Amino acid sequence: MEYTLTELANRCGGLLRGNGDTLIRSVATIQHAGPGAITFLSNNRYRRYLAETRAAAVILTPADADICPVPALVSDNPYLLYARVATLLTAALAPQKGVDAGAKIHPDARVSAEAWIAPGVVLEKGVVIARGACIGPNCVIQAGASVGEDSRLVANVTLCHDVRVGKRALIHPGAVLGADGFGIARDGDTWVKVPQLGSVVIGDDVEIGANTTIDRGALEDTVIDNGVKLDNQIQVGHNAHIGEHTAIAGCVGISGSAHIGRRCMIGGGAGVAGHIEICDDVTITAMTIVSHSIHEPGVYSGSLPMDTGAQWRKNSARFRQLDEFVRRLITIEKKLKD
């Protein structure tokens, strides 16, 4: 795709500075961009490359606009504007339509004539594939599951029985939605499996990363609300609920029945205990262990090294009192000096 800088400004936003007839064909980093490429500057670490950039244009803030040697799109949020421009420039070709001869489709499955079913796909009884959906190579969709309009399963995705995926979802390779939750009951020295009778419901505009797994509910459904973005290799336990527009980075583990609010951000490698609630607008930093509910918006961090359970609980309680202890110690020291 090719656009003039004026066309990009009109379609994506931003204030045009410089020659609006500049042709843009691609995106690149500020260090390596060349003719025909647009780049962006949102991190001051890369500001030193601006003066010598060979890019055709740069997306940047008003503070950097006056020192930009090439045409620019100016925005208070250059990364967001870059996302829109890059999406436009790299828009995929219109998806194919129809069913490849190498797919196996149950006679009772309902597939829109406007959908694409790639080689190796298996669609079981009662599956519904809506208009504009793209089911990539070797995906398996079990009985009763459904995929909404314009959603894309890239490749090797498994939707277990009765899973429901909304509109415009993007599910990356290897993701598994609707496997049994980890429900087992103790019977002496052995374990008895607890039937997992719920399903998984995915809202609209959700993205699910490669090899991420979302377990089906034990009785009620596991729910991923509209606009949620999940990175690679995340585990979501049975009956968990993730609120709208929450973003979760790679390798996070979410235990069963955890309820995460809207617009939250959870950093990589964090762990969320089961049966707790996290309110809206909470940020959890990387590697944090969330062991109890959070009822106030804000940024939360923290983890402690492994110890015996009893000792860890004692130390954890004392750690929370550390600031108070330090203040008391400072007061005592001042009195002793006096």
Image (cartoon, rainbow, N blue to C red):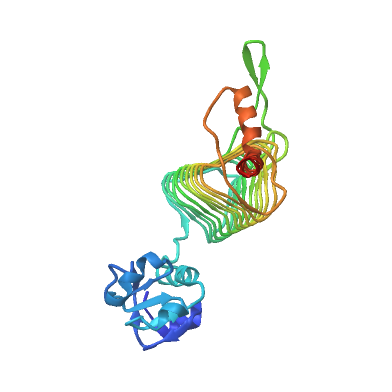
Q: Residue at 29% x, 71% y: name it.
A: 33
Query: Can you give x and y, in whole percent of width and height, for residue 315 in the image?
Result: 61, 30
Left or right: residue 5 compared with residue 168:
left
The quadrant in which the N terminus is found is bottom left
Q: Is residue 300 above or below residue 29?
A: above
Extreme-top residue of the structure: 188
Relative to 18, 168 lies left or right: right
What x and y, as percent, mark residue 94? 44, 66
**Which image quadrant: the C terminus?**
top right
In this view, the residue in front, 263 or 102, is 263
Residue located at (49% from left, 80% from top)? 14
Is residue 36 at all visible to an observer of this figure?
Answer: no
Compared to 248, does 195 lie above or below? above
Camera sees residue 258: yes
* Front residue (pair 120, 198): 198
Give the x, y percent position of residue 297.
68, 54
Q: Quadrant of residue 58?
A: bottom left
Of residues 10 and 67, the one nearer the viewer is 67
Residue 109: x percent and y percent?
A: 59, 47
Quadrant in the rendering for residue 292: top right
